[in-house]
Amino acid sequence: MKFGSSQTGVGKSVERVEDGRLLTGHGRYTDDLRLPGTAFGVTLRSPYGHAEIRSIDASAARAMPGVLAIYLADDLADYGELPCVVPLSGPIKTPRPLLVKDRVRFVGDGIAFVVAETREAARAAADAIEIDFDELPAVATIEAAIAPGAPKVWPDAPSNDVFLWEVGNKDSADAALAEAHHITRLRVVQNRIAPTSMEVRAAVGEWADGAGFTLHVGSQGVAGMRQMLAGMVLKCPAEQLRIMTGDVGGGFGMKTFLYAEYALVLHAAKQLGRPVKWTGERSDAFQTDTHGRAMESDAALAFDKDGRITALKVETWSDLGAYQAQFGPAIQTLAGGRIIGGVYRIPAIHNAVHGIITNTAPVDAYRGAGRPESAYIMERLIEAAARELGIAVDELRRRNLLTPAELPHDNGLGLQFDIGNFPAVLDKALANADWAGFPARKAAAAARGNRYGRGLCYYVEIAGGGSRDEFADVKVLPGGTVEVAVGTQSNGQGHETVYAQVTAERLGIPIEQVKVVQGDTDRLDQGNGTGGSRSMAWGGGACLLAADDVIARGIALAKADLGDEVDYADGLFRGRATNATLSLSELADKHPGALDGRARFAPEDPRPTFPNGCHVAEVEIDPATGGVAVARYSLVDDFGTIVNPMLLLGQIHGGVAQGLGQVLTENVVYDENAQLLTGSFMDYGIPRADDMPAHIGFDTLPTISPTNPLGAKGCGEAGTIGAMPSVMNAIIDALDGTQLEMPATPEKIWRICQSLAVPMAAE
C-alpha cells in the first residue's frame, strides 16, 4: 500500500484523538486513582549532602495518630537495590538501596518511608522521626570531586573518577593535531538540568493474595520496568507483578527509570493489606528525579590550510551524581559519545569520557540523552573556528559536510551514517532563514541601540539504536473495532493518534475504528518503551506488521466463504471468482478471536536511524539589561517519512522550548556543602512562553530511512538538539564572538556588554 492514500493516513495532519479526553478532564493520571481503603506514603529524605547516620529513633512517630507503619532499611533486607544496568566502572560499585541505613550521599536520599491514613498524618510523622547525623565533607561539583585530596563519595573507590571510557583512535587524532594548520580549542560547560515534568512522579501499590502485586505508575514503558522491578528489586517472578500506566504528563527520559517509591508502595501494600499511594511534591522532584546534562569538556578541532577538518579530540568529565543511575553511565558514552563530530568529514577522531561521582542527585537521560551535548560541543567548535579562520560559518560547514556520494560513511566511532543529503538541507535552511537579509536586520537592531547575532547548528541524532524489537498486539473486536496494544508509552507525544493512522491506513478502515491501548502488562507484557526517539520507527513498524498479519489471517479464513482466491482492500475481503465480499467486522464476528495476534518488529540488523537538520537562530540583546529575545528561528529537518506533520511540529516546538530553557534560564545549583539551592520554581528558571520566538519556521527535506517499514526517523528530541547550539551561537555572535557558557543569563550578558563597544548602526 502506498502511504498517504487516505485522508487520515500517513502524512496527514490528523487532530489528536486523545485530546477530547484530556482537555475535558477525563484523563487518568496516577494521582487521580482513588482506590477504596488507600493509605498514603511519604519519604523522609536526607537534609545533608553527605553524612553518616548514627541512629534513627522512630518510636514517637509510630505512636502518632493515623500512622500505620514506618519502614527503615532493615525492613527491606529481602529486596534488591535500584539497578544500574550499564555499569562502566569495573570493580567500583555504587549500590543504591531503597532506603539508606548508614550513609546518605545527596540531599534527598531516602531514609524512611512513612505510611498513614492521610498524607498530612504521614508528613507529620516523618517530621517527628529523630535522626542523629554526623555530617561529612561533600563534593558538589566536578572540579571539587577531582581535586587532589578530595573527599570520596564512596570510600572504597580509589577516587571519585570511577571510569574512563574511550572511543576512536587517540594516536591518529594526536598525530593530526600535531600537524594541523590551525586548531580551535574550547572548554565547554553544559549546565545541570532538572526535568520538571508537568506531572510529578506518583505511584500506587496494591497486593492481592494469589494475584500478587499491581503497581500504577507514570512510566515510559511498563514491560521493561516490570522485568527490572520484579527481577532485580522485588526478587519475584515477573508474572507476580502487573504494572499499569495511564496518562502521563511529561517524561523526557526521567520517567523511564525505577525509583525507590515504586517498590516501597508495593511492600507497604502487601504488609498492610490495603492500597498505598505516594505522590511526590515538587521539592521531591527537584531533589530526586534524575537530572540531565552536567558535564564539562575540553575540545580541540584541527584544520588544514583549506579549512577542512583533519581531527577532533574531546575529553569530557561527566557528573553522574552520587549513584550510577539506571542508564546514567551510558548517556555521555554509548548514547552521545559515538555521535560526536556530527555528519562532518573527520579523518581522525577520539572521544574520552570520565565518569565522576559527586554528592548530588543521580544524572541520567534527559531529552536527547547525550546527543544534544555532543552536537553542542561540535557546533560551538565549528562556529568558533570559522571566526578564527576568517571563513563564513555556513561555508566552513559546507566544506566539511558529508555528501550523498560519500554515504554510507563510518564515522570512526562505531556508527555508519546510511542516508541523507546534508548539504542540501543546509542550503534550504539558509534560504528559508533569509540568510542574505541578516545584515539589514542587524543594522536595524543597532539603530535601536541593541546587539544582534545569528547562530547555526547542523545536528545529527542517533535515534532508536540498539533496541532489539518492538511489539503490537491486535484484537478485532465484535463490530469491527480494531484494538492495537503497543509496547511503547505516550508521555504526551500523541501515540494514540499516529499508531491509529498507521494501522487504519494499512487495514483500509476509518481511523475511528482503531483503538490504541498502552500501559498494561496484563494486556501486553512485551515492549521496550518510549525513549531515544524510537517509537514510530519501531512501534510503527510493529503496527504495520500486526495489520499485515490480520490481513493474512483474514484471507485464509475468508477462503471458506469466498473461494480459493481472495483479495483484501479498504476493509473488505473479496473473492476473485465470485466478487462476493466480507467486511473485516463481518469476518471477525463470524470467527471470534481468529484474527487476533501479536506482531514483533525485529530486524536482523537493528540499526539506528539518523535524523538530522539545520537550525538557524537570530537573537537581539538589550545591552542595558542583558535581556535576550529570540527574534527569528527556523529549521529544516530530515525525519524520513512523516506520519503526522501537525504532531511533529508540536514535538519540535516543545524540544526548542527545552533547548532554549537550558541556554537562557535553567540551571541546577548546589552550594559547596552539596545543599540544593534551586529546589523550587522560585529558584529554578524554566522557560516561559515569552522566551519563545513568536514564530518557528519549519520545513523538511526527507530521505527515507531503510531501517523500518515506515521509512521514518526519530523526531522527538531533535528540537532540543538543534536549539541549544544555534541559540547559544547566536548570542556569542551578538557579543562579537565573546565565549560564555549556559545559562546565558542577563547578568552574564550585561557584564560582557559593558566591556564591548556600543553597536553602530549602518550608515
Image: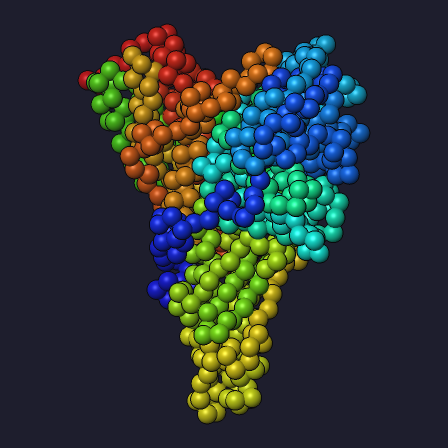
For the point 58% across and 40% down, the residue is 39
Q: Is residue 94 left or right of residue 758?
A: right
Farthest residue, direction left? 763
Q: Quadrant of residue 266?
A: top right
Number of marks present in the image shown = 0
Above or below, 452 against 14 in this view is above
Q: Nearer the viewer, residue 436 or 474?
A: 474
Where residue 185 sits: x, y (%)? 55, 19
Q: Can you say which quadrant of the picture contains the C terminus?
A: top left
Q: Nearer the viewer, residue 738 or 437?
A: 738
Note whether residue 171 is visible: no
Q: Is residue 388 left or right of residue 153?
A: left
Farthest residue, direction bottom? 578
Where residue 562 sits: x, y (%)? 50, 88
Which color scheme is applied?
rainbow
Where residue 439 sits: x, y (%)? 27, 26
Above or below, 514 against 308 in this view is below
Where residue 708 sits: x, y (%)? 55, 57
Above or below, 269 against 94 in this view is below
Q: Nearer the viewer, residue 597 or 110?
A: 110
For the point 58% across and 30% down, the residue is 65
Note whether residue 734 is visible: yes
For the point 60% across and 12% down, the residue is 673
Q: Quadrant of residue 745?
A: top left
Q: Nearer the viewer, residue 170 or 476?
A: 476
For the point 54% across and 19% down, the residue is 676
